[in-house]
Amino acid sequence: MKKTRWYDYLWIWSILYFALGFFNIFFAWLGMIDFLVPIIIAIVGGNKWFCNNLCGRGQLFNLIGKKLKCSRNKPAPKWIASKWFRYGFLVFFLTMFGNMIFQTWLVGSGASSLKEAVKLFWTFRVPWSWAYSAGKVPDWVAQFSFGFYSLMLTSALIGLIVMALYKPRTWCTFCPMGTMTQSICKIRNKDTESAI
Ligand code: SF4
């Protein structure tokens, strides 16, 4: 029987993250851990150890889809795993991330005002003011929180939709973090090979 390790329970962290952001939007900043750790591991270790062991989101999709049987468990259409779609989605995602940083900068520079809302699917603005107490931190810090939480929630919802429609971890086939770390590993391992 497979030995259970502490990091097999990181799916709890995934749930906790969204729950905390529901009550206090500043917890959104903690999502940076899930952004930076996989990149650091890919750069330093040249592998996807994060995806294979530490990703609470991947574990959560497995749990809901496989164990709780909330997935149709059908193969996803081939185009979802195609290179053009994976890299296209990565470019789109990074553009949206850049736009979020730009909005944060606009608020920080006073050119725009803070929007106490979460934007779902980059389109639907959902008021979220209960999770924010004005004046405690600079507005740009709050703007980043709302923007980053929007990004995290939107990607989780997309992941849940494809989990329900196809296999539990279909999101992983085009997850921007997965595509990005895979590219880093490829470049890094090529460099290592050519240095030998
Ligand atoms: S591909 Fe994305 S969601 Fe899947 S395990 Fe890796 S980081 Fe997590």
Image: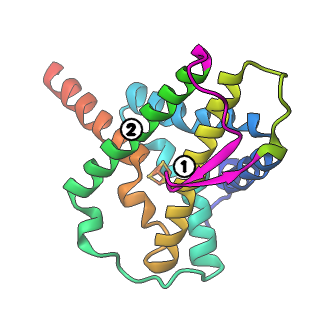
Q: Nearer the viewer, residue 36 or 160?
A: 160
Question: Quick check: is 91 in the magenta stretch?
Answer: no
Q: Please, is residue 39 above or below residue 164 in the view? A: above
Q: Please tell me which of labels 1 and 2 falls first in the chain.
A: 1
Q: As drawn, is 108 to the left or to the right of 83?
A: right
* Figure disc tally: 2
Residue at screen point 50% across, 63% down:
159
Residue 131 location (% of width, % of height): 81, 43
- The residue sitting at 43% across, 58% down in the picture is 172
Residue at 79% from the left image edge and 46% from the top image edge: 20
Q: Amino acid at mark 1?
A: Asn
Residue 113 part of the magenta segment: yes
Q: Report if the beta carbon of the residue with label 1 is closer than 8 angstroms to ligand 1.
A: no
Residue bounds of the magenta highlight? 108-128
- Few, some or many residues within 10 Å of mark 2 (<14, 14–19, 20+): few
Residue tagged 2 = 94
Residue 154: tell me if it is visible.
yes
Image marks 1 and 2: residues in contact by CB distance under 8 Å: no
Q: Which quadrant holds residue 32? A: top right
Residue 139 in the image: x percent, y percent?
A: 70, 23
Which quarter of the rendering shows the C terminus? top left
Residue at numbered disc 1:
53
Which of these two is toward me, 188 or 149?
149
**Position of 109 compared to 96: left or right?**
right
